[in-house]
Amino acid sequence: MKVTFGVHLPPEGLTFTQMREACLAAEKQGYDLFTITDHFYPMRETSAGYPLESWTTLAGLAAVTERIKLAPLVSCVGYRNPALLGKMATTVDIISNGRLILGIGAGWHEPEFKAYFGRFPTVKEREDALEETAQILHSMLHEEKTTFISKRYHVENLVNQPPPVQKAIPIMIGGSGERRTLRTAAKYGDISHFFANSVEEVEKKIGVLKEHCRRCGRDFSEITLGTSRIEGGYFSAQFRDYIEACLGLGVSMFIIVVRSVGASAAETQRRFAEEIVPSFKA
């Protein structure tokens, strides 16, 4: 099992120059993946400021890097028409020469939804949108033409050209909702990513995902499992044990979430690459 390590840096209060420097450093430090959030407003009151827009930032990062994979963690399906999102993702994959992971999620930020779109959809509406968007994107990335008609979306004879560099951009479904989100991951995800606070929670989510795969006839082994951990300033033996246990459960993608800013963020990113990653990549 190939183990992938990534670093996640929200672009809140950061300039593009700072994001570029962090991403280039991650590439030099040996990280496999660099991810950013997809938000228009700060995620919390303690955030450093308002963020850059996700997809234009990813396009810029794609143009200045060479090896590291890039992804939104994750892109809210309620913010862009799914066909447009597929075209944007394809273009970023072309700019990066095949290094994009297409992360999508149902969304949760109520003030952001209301400010930009006038209302906050219900949980059912957001989960329905996630599943339908995943279906449209999967078709766009695998089929010559895509037609999908529902009450929410109307896509007819869509041709996704020029094609992405990757034969099919990996779709990463982000979220841990057991009834709907993990079911969508079972149906359409190449990667299932979820935040978890304990090994026991990781194990539970994996069990739910396996059951959804069984019910929809999907081979569970086709799905890469990913999880994230928020940095806490230093990396203890328990932190290493957590990674080891997750890997034992079949998790092969592990992302460190950097919430600090400036020199502190850069130091956390560097230390994780030097102190933790080599132990699991030898």
Image: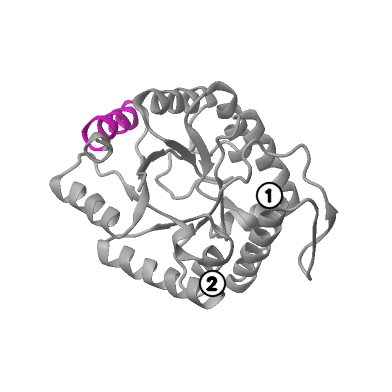
Magenta-drawn segment: 263-276
Q: Is residue 39 left or right of residue 48?
A: right
| Tag 1 secondary structure | helix
At horizontal 43% and vertical 43% (from top left) the residue drawn is 47
In this view, the residue in front, 163 or 31, is 163
| Tag 2 secondary structure | loop
Which kind of residue does numbered mark 2 sit on?
A: Arg
In the rendered image, residue 166, in percent from the top left (x then y), is placed at: 61, 39
Q: How is the image coloured?
A: one colour
In the picture of the structure, the residue carrying the numbered disc 2 is 180
Give the Cα distance between marks 2 and 1.
22 Å
Determine the residue located farthest toward the bottom in the rendered image.
Answer: 215
In the rendered image, residue 147, in percent from the top left (x then y), is placed at: 81, 60
Quadrant position of residue 236: top left
At horizontal 43% and vertical 38% (from top left) the residue drawn is 9
- Is 110 colored magenta in this rendering? no
Above or below, comparing residue 27 to residue 172 in the picture? above
Quadrant position of residue 149: bottom right
Q: Is residue 201 left or right of residue 62?
A: left
- Is 267 colored magenta in this rendering? yes
Which kind of residue does numbered mark 1 sit on?
A: Leu
Q: Which mark is residue 141?
A: 1
- Precedes in sequence: disc 2 or disc 1: 1
Q: Which mark is residue 51?
A: none
